[in-house]
Amino acid sequence: MSVAGDRQPVDMIVGGRYVVTMDADKHVIEHGAVAVKDGVIVAVGPEAEIDAAYDAPERISDENRILMPGLINGHTHSAMVLFRGMADDLPLMTWLQKYIFPMEGRYVDPEFIRIGSTLACWEMIQGGTTSFVDMYFYPGVIAKVVEKCGLRAVITAPMIDYPSPGFKGWDDSFKAGVAFVKEWQGKDSRITPGLAPHAPYTVSKEHLAEVAKVAHELHAPVSIHIAEDKAELETVGDKYHETSIEELADVGLLNEQVIAAHVVWPSDSDMKKVAGTRFAAIHNPTSNMKTGAGFSPVPKLLKAGVTVGLATDGAASNNDLNMWDEIHLAALIHKGVAEDPTVMPAATALNLATRMGAKAAGLEGVTGALQVGLRADMIQVSTESLRMQPLYDVISQLVYVANQQDVVTTIVDGKVLMKDRKVLTIDEAKLRADVAAISAKIKADLKKTRTE
Ligand SMILES: [Zn+2]
């Protein structure tokens, strides 16, 4: 037992009744703690040992808390939270053409993005998400919001063959995307800029080849929607006589870091093709069910050796950014689809949102686990509610019982973003007023749209 003077100074010690490390062995430490210095995890172990070895001015620990890595949302369109619940339960094309595209055309500008992304970040911080992969307009504005609110993000610039907010078509959206990556690379260690060609049915093959070339030159990640529904496979099949994943292989994108949202309909040979590459399938269970896209064969993808992450998608097709719902659904729906309760154990579902989720987002070695050398991105989940009692198996409780209101502390890069459920980096009153003002305009507009 060392005396106080022998203890190494650190910035913070965070502990809990259980520390769910999500390290390679997924081991859980009872009465554990983590020591943090300069935003990095410097020790993980039993709380008594950490307290004996380290001295910190800040200590956040409680017998009624579980400490675990922050969640990673692998695919979202953050500012679309401002369209949450605007139009539900419609056929995909009606939803897009009557509501989403016209509303985006009328409302999406830098101010809309600033307010929408701030609202999204507030919701993610409250729900224990510490990293996210975003794909939406005005990525430079999103990056500034992320810088300020303290989250970690892979922010990818949208590129599409058609007119979109701020762009006439491919050429200007592609140029702006490349400029965004160049501007933000190396600027803020929490922000990774990337490229986002929308999907194989909205971006031509030759344009995808341009993306592959520049992603390779810039070492930039690429996010894209892939094999989302059967209609996409038909479109790509008719045009190029191949699957969306074969198209990615053809243009050279499978040599790059590809963060592919959905992957609901991969063929067996697609799975073989992407296994062992830097391609990651991002599973969006809520969104896929809401749009009637189907169920991604996640257990099969994992068995084939494909990296899989988990995500909410944009709030317009979810309708929130609650990763706990996705963990819960990922653990359940595959059992139902396969008629086999062993295909998706709770720990596997949690892994998709943490350790493997980090790999899927290109953040392996940065975040995703409580491990010495990784950045200190972590959350505390309270077990105080009677709903969280009794507690026999901590992983099972997190996957099947916990929800976003149980998250009490959110820490990113060693900085506390939420303490006792109060978000410290966002002015809530101002955000509420901003959201009210913008949604009042949309509401009036919606009344007209619905009667048209
Ligand atoms: Zn999406």
Image (tube, rainbow, N blue to C red):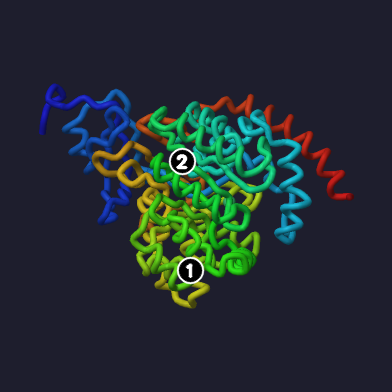
Q: Secondary structure at mark 2?
A: strand
User: In the rendered view, would you say 317 is above or below 102?
Assistant: below
Q: Locate residue 148 relative to residue 53 in the image: left or right.
A: right
Mark 1 or mark 2, earlier in chain: 2
Q: Amino acid at mark 2?
A: Val
Residue picked out by circle 2: 154
**In this orientation, which residue lies closer to the viewer: 304 or 357?**
304
Label 1 Cα crowd, 10 Å radius (few <14 / some 14-19 / many 20+): some
The quadrant in which residue 447 appears is top right
Tag 1 secondary structure: loop
Q: Position of residue 88 (x, y in %)?
A: 72, 54
User: What residue is rendered at 69% in x and 36% in y?
Assistant: 108
In this view, which residue lies farthest toward the right?
451
Residue at 49% in and 66% down: 332
- Between 135 and 404, the residue placed more toward the observer is 135
**Residue at point 42%, 42% (across, down):** 220
Three-letter code, disc 1: Pro
Q: Position of residue 152 (x, y in %)?
A: 44, 37
Instruction: Mark 1 vs mark 2: give the one in front.
Output: 2
Is the Cβ of the residue at disc 1 closer than 8 Å to that at disc 2?
no
Residue count near mark 2 (Cα–Cα under 10 Å), binned few <14, some 14–19, many ≥20: many
Q: Which residue has dot 1 on it?
A: 297
78, 26: nearer the viewer: 78
Asked whether mark 2 lies closer than 8 Å to ligand 1, one says no
Asked whether residue 88 appears in the rendered view, the answer is yes
Marks 1/2: CA distance?
A: 25 Å
User: Horizontal and vertical percent for residue 161?
Assistant: 63, 48
| The furthest residue to the bottom | 339
Q: Give the position of the N terminus as an image quadrant.
A: top left
